[in-house]
Image (tube, rainbow, N blue to C red):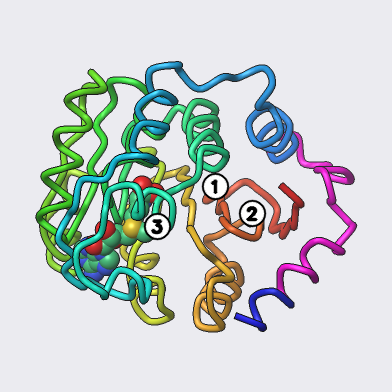
Amino acid sequence: MGWRILKFIEHLFYRRHRHGRGIHSPYLFDLVHGAIFNAKRIAVPEGIRTIHHSLLKDPTLIPALSVGQESKVDRAGNRSVASFARGSSVSPKYGALLFRVSRWFQPEMVIELGTGLGISTLYLSAGSPGIPLHTLEGNPHRAEFSEKLIKRSGLKGVKVHRGAFEELLPELEHDLKGRYLAFMDGNHSYEPTLRYMRTLLGIAGEEALVILDDIHWSREMHRAWKEVCSWPETRVSVDLFHMGILLLRRDLQKARVKIKF
Ligand SMILES: C[S@@+](CC[C@H](N)C(=O)[O-])C[C@H]1O[C@@H](n2cnc3c(N)ncnc32)[C@H](O)[C@@H]1O
């Protein structure tokens, strides 16, 4: 925890690209100013915001089943929707970021590792409505909850796959061709993160975008993030501290950017 605070302070004081300054690549500039810092112009649909806010107060209990590397709270037993939504799901601020990045990138498909209750799924899908979104969840109770939530939202094209990422990813590989946006938000540890990243790189076409959650959550995740950023395929990395964005596009110059979001 102390280490994480230290990393956060370091991030806050890193000044080079503080609010997206000093970025010369037009593509990256567009991502930063057209999506990341464009919250005033690009609003999340009211319906999604209303659903999210209702979940933050929902006392319904959902059984916990430990899958992957989860929080200590999660292993403790049943957890209310409100507790999960507050502690383990994206916040409204980061949900809105997912919405804007999805809207900006306009992928042909979205892949999400870690549906949870389906909150991040709503934002990703709302950003690129109607396109196929495959979301993977190992806890069947959460998967069931998320299916109902997605139905309630009226969003189309979303499929919740139940099971472990390790088993589902190889089964899905043939469906996952094309220009995708991936969001990795489950099993936050070093080796699995690198393994999932390698699978995603294997199916990437000319262009893809990967968002990783909690990149400085632990030393392991920090190490995994640094390593994937060093790979030749991950041309551009944008470190927002709580999330990291990787742009996979061969014609981009290698660049690493840290931003105070
Ligand atoms: C942090 S939560 C996802 C939250 C969700 N993305 C959101 O922001 O609303 C991570 C989820 O990943 C699932 N998970 C973790 N490791 C997994 C694995 N190896 N296979 C399948 N599901 C896994 C957990 O059950 C948990 O629900």
Circle 3 packing at 10 Å, graded few (<14), some (14-19), many (20+), is: some
Which residue is at 51% across, 75% downward?
Answer: 221
Up/down of 98 relative to 87, above or below: above
Q: Mark 1 = which residue?
A: 249
Q: Mark 2 = which residue?
A: 236
Name the amino acid, label 3: Ser
Label 2 with label 3: CB-CB less than 8 Å: no
Which residue is at 28% across, 48% downward?
Answer: 81
Res. 198 image quadrant: bottom left
Label 2 with label 1: CB-CB less than 8 Å: yes
One can see residue 19 in this view: yes
Q: Earlier in the sequence, mark 2 or mark 3?
A: 3
**SS state under label 1:** strand
Task: Judge from the rendering whether residue 107 lies leftward or rightward of residue 176; answer left or right.
Answer: right
Which of the pair 200/111 is nearer the observer?
Answer: 111
Could you tell me what secondary structure mostly forms the magenta stretch? Answer: loop
Provide residue 200's location: percent of width, then percent of height. 35, 58
**SS state under label 3:** loop
Region of the chain picked out in magenta, as a range: 7-27
